[in-house]
Every structure is written in C-alpha cells, then in structure tokens.
C-alpha cells in the first residue's frame, strides 16, 4: 500500500500554477503562427494609422497652399483660373474649411462676373452644405438677393435680403440688408413690405444711417 501524502495549500497553488504555465506554453507552441500573425497585423495597423495621419496632414497643407494660390489668382484678375482651382479644392477637400470658403468664393466671383445664375447656384450650394458661420451664411443669402436684384426680380430680392438679415440679426451688415430689402420692395411696388422693414430699422437702428436712408428712399418713392 502506498502512504497518502497530504499536500499543503501552497503546494497545491504551485502545482496549479505550473500546470497553467505548461498548458499556456503548449498552446503558444501549437499556435505560434497565429500569435506571430496577430503581432504583425497589430504592427501594420499602427503603422497604417501613422501613415494616414501624416498623409492627411500633407493633404491639408497642400489644400491650404492651393487655396492661397486661388485667392492670389482672383486678386490678380485671373478669375477663370481661380474658379478652376476653387472647384478642385471643393472636390478634393470636401467637408474642410478651405472647401467651405472656396464654395463661397465661387459664388462671389460669378456674382462679380455677372453670371448671376451660377452665383445663385454656388451660394445655394454653400447654404445647403455649411451651417456654422452665420456671417458667411448671411453673405450668401445677400449674394442670392443681389443676383435677383440685378436680374430685375425685385420682390424675390427683397425677400432674400430679409432672410440675410434674419440669419445674423446682430451682424455688421444687418441694417444694410434691411435697407436693401426696402429698396427692392419699393421697386416691386410692395410699399407695405417696405414700410414693415422701415419699422424694424427705426426700432432697432434708431438714428443710424441705415434707418435714415431707408426712410428717405420711402419718401422719395412714395412721396410720403
């Protein structure tokens, strides 16, 4: 007969630990290729993330340089070249700040070239794509309004100038937009609409140049 040997708790823990280690070692030995492959995949993921980050930074820098070049071309009078570059920026940098500004610039350039239908198209594109900058949104609405005014569409122009005002009521051009609305409503024969805007001007911009100018326009046009 064999004598029973009573193991201590420490010996039991050590035996369990050794069994675990041996089992783990065997699993690693049996599956070494999967462990190596997993490590390689992790390395590639990390390298790819760094490469993506660097490539995005490079792309952004190239976009800014192209935007600056397009602005320079616009200022020098090369409008068609500038439009081409702004268009490429919008295509290649969608969602970025330079694409937002480029869209607005395409509306501005077409407005200055009297291509009003194209100006409206780009201003509307800006408004449907970007919502963060209230000043630029009010400018876009004013660009649409000015295009309608230059096309002789005075009622539509007046309505859009009011929207431009409402988009940024505390903006630096708020009073000017209301004066423009008054001017266009008067041209359209909409004296009631013009009078409503004058009321707003005289309440919010009492004694200012826009309020005085609007009242003068109304008096000259209606004799009242």
Image (cartoon, helix red, strand yellow):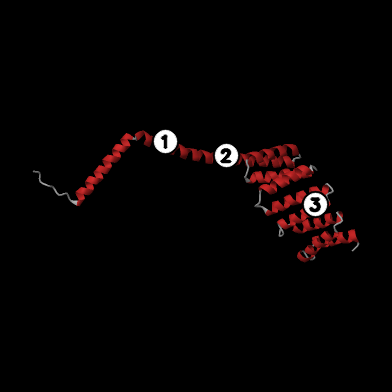
Q: Foreground residue, 76 or 171?
A: 171
Task: Please tell me whether mark 1 sits on a helix, a strand or a loop.
Answer: helix
User: Which residue is under mark 2?
Assistant: 58
Tell whether label 3 touches label 2 (CB within 8 Å).
no
Q: Nearer the viewer, mark 2 or mark 3?
A: 3
User: Which residue is under mark 3?
Assistant: 156
Q: Nearer the viewer, mark 1 or mark 2?
A: 1
| Image location of residue 29, percent across then percent down | 31, 35
Sooner in the amino-acid sequence: mark 1 or mark 2:
1
Residue displayed at 24% across by 43% down: 18
Residue displayed at 22% across by 47% down: 14
Q: Residues within 10 Å of mark 3 (few under 14, many from 20)?
A: some
Q: CA distance from mark 3 to mark 1?
A: 63 Å
Return the residue found at the far right.
Answer: 223
Q: Which mark is residue 40?
A: 1
Sooner in the amino-acid sequence: mark 3 or mark 1:
1
| Image location of residue 9, percent across then percent down | 20, 51
Q: Residues within 10 Å of mark 2 (few under 14, many from 20)?
A: few
> Which quadrant holds residue 33?
top left
Q: CA distance from mark 2 to mark 3?
A: 44 Å
Q: Quadrant of the C terminus?
A: bottom right
Residue displayed at 72% across by 36% down: 81
Q: Residues within 10 Å of mark 1 (few under 14, many from 20)?
A: few
Task: Please tell me whether mark 3 sits on a helix, a strand or a loop.
Answer: helix
Residue 173 visible from this viewpoint: no
Residue displayed at 25% across by 45% down: 17
Return the residue found at the far left.
Answer: 1
Q: In the picture shown, does residue 46 fall above or below 208?
A: above
Task: Please tell me whether mark 2 sits on a helix, a strand or a loop.
Answer: helix
């Amino acid at each position: 007969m064999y004598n029973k040997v009573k193991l201590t708790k420490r010996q039991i823990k050590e035996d369990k630990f050794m069994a675990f280690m041996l089992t783990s070692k065997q699993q690693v030995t049996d599956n070494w290729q999967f462990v190596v492959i997993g490590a390689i995949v992790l390395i590639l993921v990390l390298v790819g993330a760094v490469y993506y980050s660097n490539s995005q930074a490079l792309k952004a820098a190239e976009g800014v340089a192209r935007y600056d070049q397009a602005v320079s071309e616009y200022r020098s009078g090369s409008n068609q070249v500038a439009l081409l570059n702004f268009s490429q920026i919008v295509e290649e940098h969608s969602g970025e700040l330079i694409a937002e500004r480029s869209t607005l610039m395409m509306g501005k350039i077409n407005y200055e070239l009297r291509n009003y239908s194209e100006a409206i198209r780009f201003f509307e594109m800006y408004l449907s794509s970007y919502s963060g900058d209230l000043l630029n949104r009010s400018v876009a609405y004013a660009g649409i309004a000015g295009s309608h005014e230059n096309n002789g569409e005075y009622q539509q122009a007046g309505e859009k100038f009011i929207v431009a005002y409402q988009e940024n009521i505390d903006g630096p051009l708020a009073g000017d937009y209301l004066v423009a609305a008054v001017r266009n409503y008067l041209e359209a024969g909409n004296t009631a609409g013009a009078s409503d805007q004058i009321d707003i001007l005289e309440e919010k911009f009492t004694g200012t140049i826009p309020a005085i100018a609007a009242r003068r326009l109304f008096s000259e046009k209606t004799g009242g």
